[in-house]
């Protein structure tokens, strides 16, 4: 079953909006095509901390601060997954990884406080042409992150 179908099954009982659109590859393009503020975009980053890959979700208007992630997780090393690692772990390419861990991916999920501070989240649903928009409390109830903490800073 495709990632998109698995996400749709996971969200079946949660209020959400599904958008089908032209292909997108950047957070700014996604916000524009969705007609949503950049800040509510959930940018998913797959990173490896001391040998463990995890999904880290930040607002698309922010940048990850590796030192905060390392400190919170007690990790010495942190790096982004390579394109090949991302494909192996998720079956996806950069720009369409949804902000989900288990049960969609067998990866821990960490959510930045910038997501929680918003009323809504918009994200790619495992496809460069499909997005989901939903209320953050509904997202958090479904995503069940392993941790929520501040690990991003404004990009501007």
Image (spheres, rainbow, N blue to C red):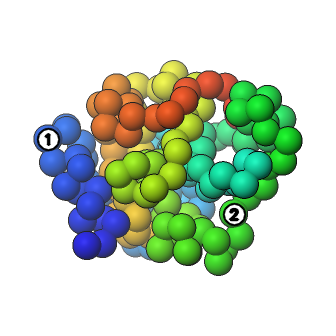
The answer to whether residue 61 is left or right of residue 155 is left
Distance (Cα) linking label 1 and label 2 = 32 Å
Q: Is residue 32 visible?
A: no
> Quadrant where the C terminus lies?
top right
Q: Secondary structure at mark 2?
A: loop
Location of residue 126 by image quarter: bottom left
Q: Nearer the viewer, residue 41 or 80?
A: 80
Please, is residue 20 above or below residue 38 in the view?
Answer: below
The residue at the point 71 percent across, 70 percent down is 82
**Farthest front residue?**
51
Q: How many marks?
A: 2
Q: Nearer the viewer, residue 12 or 114?
A: 12
The residue at the point 55 percent across, 74 percent down is 88
Q: Which mark is residue 21?
A: none
Q: Nearer the viewer, residue 45 or 61?
A: 45
Query: Badge 2 is on which residue?
Result: 81
The answer to whether residue 155 is left or right of residue 138 is right
| Position in image of residue 107 (x %, y %) | 51, 52
| Position in image of residue 150 (x %, y %) | 67, 25
Please, is residue 59 above or below residue 94 in the view?
Answer: above
Query: Badge 1 is on which residue?
Result: 13
- The mark that comes first in sequence, 1 or 2, is 1
The answer to whether residue 125 is left or right of residue 55 is left
Q: Residues within 10 Å of mark 1 (few under 14, many from 20)?
A: few
| Position in image of residue 110 (x %, y %) | 56, 37
Q: Give the mark toward the camera: 1 or 2.
A: 2
Q: Nearer the viewer, residue 58 or 143?
A: 143
């Amino acid at each position: 079953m495709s990632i998109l179908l698995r996400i749709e099954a996971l969200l079946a009982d949660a209020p959400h909006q599904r958008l089908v659109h032209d292909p997108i590859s950047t957070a700014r393009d996604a916000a524009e095509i969705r007609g949503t503020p950049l800040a509510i975009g959930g940018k998913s980053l797959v990173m490896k901390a001391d040998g463990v890959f995890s999904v880290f979700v930040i607002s698309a208007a922010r940048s990850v601060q590796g030192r905060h992630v390392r400190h919170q997780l007690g990790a010495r090393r942190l790096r982004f997954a390579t394109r090949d690692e991302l494909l192996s772990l998720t079956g996806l390419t950069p720009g369409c990884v949804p902000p989900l861990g288990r049960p969609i991916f067998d990866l821990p999920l960490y959510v930045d406080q910038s997501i929680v501070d918003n009323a809504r989240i918009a994200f790619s649903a495992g496809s460069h042409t499909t997005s989901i928009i939903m209320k953050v409390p509904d997202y958090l109830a479904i995503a069940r992150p392993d941790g929520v903490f501040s690990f991003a800073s404004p990009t501007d």
